């Protein structure tokens, strides 16, 4: 049933020693890899048929002091959705832009820069995206308290405890 | 005798003007701006200016329990809310390991296809308006009302349904729903030839849109385009076929495509999809099995979803809509991220396609991509 996924897993494992590959269910493949090897893995996958970048997500793991970048790729031939994950430091985070591989990564990187503060080297368009005149900390980070911000910014009294 | 002043900038010499297209514009459903740099009648550069509908849903979802998030998710897209509900339900089911009853899968399919049709009819209204076919536009808007009525019968809500819910759907079909649906479908089907005669087979429409804003298949994939826009370039890709969800694996349907990838092809693909949706809803209503429409979920006030992560996707009216959800084992999502099909098309693709376009075409290029602003901003 999941032969194609198994093959793909072996292929990645043979080429990337430090990549940890799991197959959670049919049509899904998760690779956890160090940040140094991430770009070459993405290039490898792109050459291997994963031509569609669906999404780039960022997850803030506050307790571990790390930000996790998740690259979602899809292969139209193999019908596999690959999630490539890597962790970067939470203090002054920066990473390489993957625009040379996937052009529309620009917008995702722009959003992650705005919402999580990750600076992508090589992306020249890290200008405000969704927020207007934002001066505070990156709002999607876990230590940004929405309720506290609203209370201070708009001077709202908390009525019910 | 003219003397060029050395202090004038390059932009002034070439007489470029900056023009704000939107955020309030009849062509765009929702608020969305484009900043155009025009020289005469030609667009030199376009910059998308989103953010007017940013409501911070992803952040809000981290503060709310799984049950409280339910009424939030449909509001991610006003025109086509049900795919977002289905995505959220599927993500929670995947994380919590819930099984969905067969009957609920069929009801979801009916709901998703009705939503697709409603979205396409609304698009026909906007597109018709944009090219100057007001009669056609009003017909489409009127026919959409039949579907909205069905939604009201089924869920109590016209625009937002909060109906597809982890574990199944909120209520079973009410008595007489199938007959009412067949009637509405019949009506829309008899209207389709009229739409064709008035608009889709109309020479004026073809002249206006053929060869405008062309994307080829490889470029479209490289830019992250999915859905009707990708199918208009000749690629037969559809999440309903590639990774069947709900009851799509049991139903028989075609994926319509066109070859040219221009504004015209994109419109025709949307038109052909309406027929497929009608057929899908009929099949689903005829084959719907008996049984429960909802499998009981744990107490929503104490519902801790096991830790893990998942990515689920459906084919919304605009393309691949995906949902990435991370749970840390508590009663609220640790991270929720929506992949909307309008996100690449509304920013990068739009900017690319508008370069060199005529100012008069800006509106219908934007609409032919079927962009939904609330989906981009979230």
Image: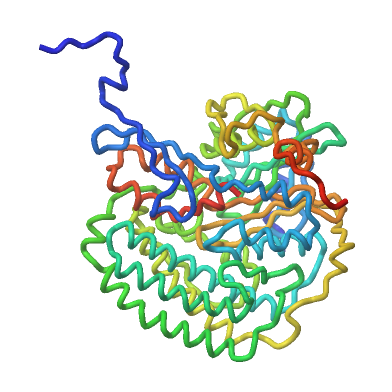
Can you tell which quarter of the image residue A155 is in? top right
Image coords of residue B188 (percent x, y): 41, 79
Return the x and y of residue B240 as percentages of the image width and height. Answer: 57, 66
**Which residue is at the far left?**
B1
Q: Nearer the viewer, residue B97 or B178?
A: B178
Q: Name the residue at 65% across, 84% down.
A: B173
Q: Is residue B117 above or below residue A159?
A: below
Q: Quadrant of residue B245?
A: bottom right
Residue A50 visible in the shown view: no
Q: How many marks?
A: 0
Q: Nearer the viewer, residue B252 or B92?
A: B92
Give percent across and percent down for residue A142: 79, 39
Residue at x 81%, y 52% (from the top left corner): B327
Front-lying residue, B246 or B60: B60
For residue B234, above or below residue B3: below
Residue A144 shows in this picture: yes
How are the residues colored?
A: rainbow
* Residue located at (28% from left, 55% from top): B209
């Amino acid at each position: 049933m999941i032969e194609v996924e198994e093959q793909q897993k072996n292929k990645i494992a043979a080429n990337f020693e430090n990549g940890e590959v799991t197959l959670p269910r049919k049509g899904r493949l998760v690779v956890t890899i160090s940040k140094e090897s991430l770009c070459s893995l993405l290039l490898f996958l792109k050459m291997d048929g994963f031509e569609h970048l669906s999404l780039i997500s960022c997850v803030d793991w506050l307790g571990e002091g790390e930000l996790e970048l998740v690259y979602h790729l899809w292969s139209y031939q193999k019908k596999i959705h690959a999630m490539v994950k890597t962790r970067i430091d939470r203090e002054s985070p920066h990473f390489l832009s993957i625009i040379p591989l996937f052009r529309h990564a620009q917008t995702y990187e722009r959003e992650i820069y705005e919402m999580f503060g990750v600076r992508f080297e090589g992306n020249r368009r890290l200008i405000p995206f969704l927020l207007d005149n934002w001066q505070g900390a990156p709002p999607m980070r876990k230590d940004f308290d929405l309720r506290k911000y609203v209370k201070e910014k708009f001077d709202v009294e908390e009525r019910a405890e | 005798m003219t003397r060029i002043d050395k202090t004038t900038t390059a932009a002034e010499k070439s007489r470029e003007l900056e023009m704000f297209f939107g955020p309030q514009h009849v062509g765009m459903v929702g608020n969305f701006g484009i900043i155009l740099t025009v020289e005469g009648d030609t667009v030199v550069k376009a910059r998308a200016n989103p953010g007017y509908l940013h409501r911070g849903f992803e952040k809000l979802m981290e503060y709310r329990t799984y049950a409280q998030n339910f009424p939030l998710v449909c509001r991610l897209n006003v025109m086509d809310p049900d795919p977002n509900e289905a995505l959220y339900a599927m993500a929670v089911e995947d994380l919590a390991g819930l099984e969905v009853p067969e009957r609920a899968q069929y009801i979801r399919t009916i709901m998703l296809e009705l939503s697709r049709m409603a979205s396409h009819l609304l698009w026909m209204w906007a597109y018709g308006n944009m090219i100057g076919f007001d009669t056609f536009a009003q017909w489409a808007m009127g026919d959409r009302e039949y579907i909205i009525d069905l939604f009201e019968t089924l869920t109590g809500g016209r625009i937002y349904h909060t109906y597809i819910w982890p574990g199944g759907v909120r209520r079973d079909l009410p008595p007489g729903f199938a007959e009412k649906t067949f009637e509405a479908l019949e009506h829309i089907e008899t209207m389709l030839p009229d739409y064709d005669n008035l608009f889709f087979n109309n020479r004026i429409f073809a002249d206006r849109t053929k060869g405008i804003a062309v994307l080829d298949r490889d470029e479209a994939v490289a830019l992250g385009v999915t859905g009707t826009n990708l199918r208009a370039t000749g690629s037969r890709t559809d999440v309903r076929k590639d990774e069947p969800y709900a009851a799509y694996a049991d139903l028989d349907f075609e994926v319509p495509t066109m070859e040219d990838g221009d504004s015209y092809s994109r419109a025709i693909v949307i038109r052909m999809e309406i027929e497929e949706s009608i057929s899908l809803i009929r099949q689903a209503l005829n084959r719907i099995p008996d049984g429960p429409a909802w499998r009981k979920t744990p107490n929503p006030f104490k519902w801790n979803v096991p830790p893990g992560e998942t990515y689920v996707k459906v084919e919304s009216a605009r393309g691949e809509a995906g949902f990435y959800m991370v749970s840390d084992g508590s009663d609220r999502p640790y991270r929720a991220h929506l992949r909307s099909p309008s996100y690449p098309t509304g920013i990068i693709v739009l900017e690319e396609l508008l370069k060199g376009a005529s100012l008069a075409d800006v509106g219908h290029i934007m609409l032919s991509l079927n962009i939904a602003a609330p989906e981009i901003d979230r």
